[in-house]
Image (tube, helix red, strand yellow):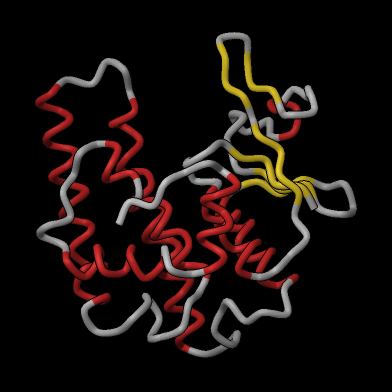
Amino acid sequence: MKLYYSPGACSLSPHIVAREGKLPVELSKVTFSAEGRTTAEGEDFYKLNPKGGYIPALRIDSGEVIAEGVAIVQYLADQSSVSMTPEKGTIEYYRMLEWLTFISSELHKGFSPLYASNITEEAKEAQIKKIFGRMAFAELELGKHTYLIGDTFTIADAYLYTIMRWTKRFEMSLAAHPNIAAFMARMEQRDGVKEALKEEELDPIQ
């Protein structure tokens, strides 16, 4: 399998899952330029993922390509002998799906406007306020247990960790979110997270 990624982007989530799951996943860094998006092998990434050329994408052993981070992390979890999801059919499993959806639609997409080069300071402040409002739910839940689904790591934690790293990029203090800050520190003690950060040449944020 080969994971197409960009350092620190949302592709860090499946990268972490691959390393946590001890899966033999190769990496291919995608380079962004005015001319387009190119893989480390010189391929046109838009041809690999025609849905806007978004990362991440995963080329599986059959040669097919899976896009969308939420789908990729679930696929990787199913390929691993390491348990990273609750048992299917349990309420915990559906809570995990609930979290993956919430992170994708309310947190991940919430940061997207901040990357626009033409965003005004007023709009930026309003968007950050909205993100903090969405983060309150995660802050509450992480005050009850170690990870999002009880005290066991799941693929949802890899996704939350990845998106919450962006708070540092936009100088969003976690002082009012101590449970999230503590969660980030715990995640950065995990071997799979350490390995993924090293491979992407990223520093811990806690």
Q: Residue at x 30, y 31 (%)?
A: 113
Spot occupied by residue 165 in the image (x, y as percentages of width and height)? 35, 49
Residue projecting furthest to the top: 35
Q: How far from the left and from the top, in percent, is residue 146?
A: 34, 81
Q: How many numbered callouts?
A: 0
Residue drawn at point x = 17 percent, y = 66 percent:
178
Q: Is residue 184 above or below residue 169?
A: below
Give whichever of 128, 39 is nearer the camera.
39
Q: Residue at x 74, y 65 (%)?
A: 23
Q: Position of residue 54 (x, y in %)?
A: 58, 34
| Quadrant position of the C terminus in the picture | bottom left
Q: Is residue 118 left or right of residue 104?
A: left
**Dividing the picture into quarters, in which one does residue 133 lie?**
bottom left
Image: 105 above or below 142:
above
Compared to residue 24, the image places residue 68 above or below, namely above
Residue 190: x %, y % from top left = 48, 69
Residue furthest to the right: 62
Report whether 60 appears left or right of 88.
Answer: right
Left/right of residue 68 with respect to residue 80 in the rendered view: left
Q: Residue at x 60, y 43 (%)?
A: 56
In the foreground, 147 or 116 = 147
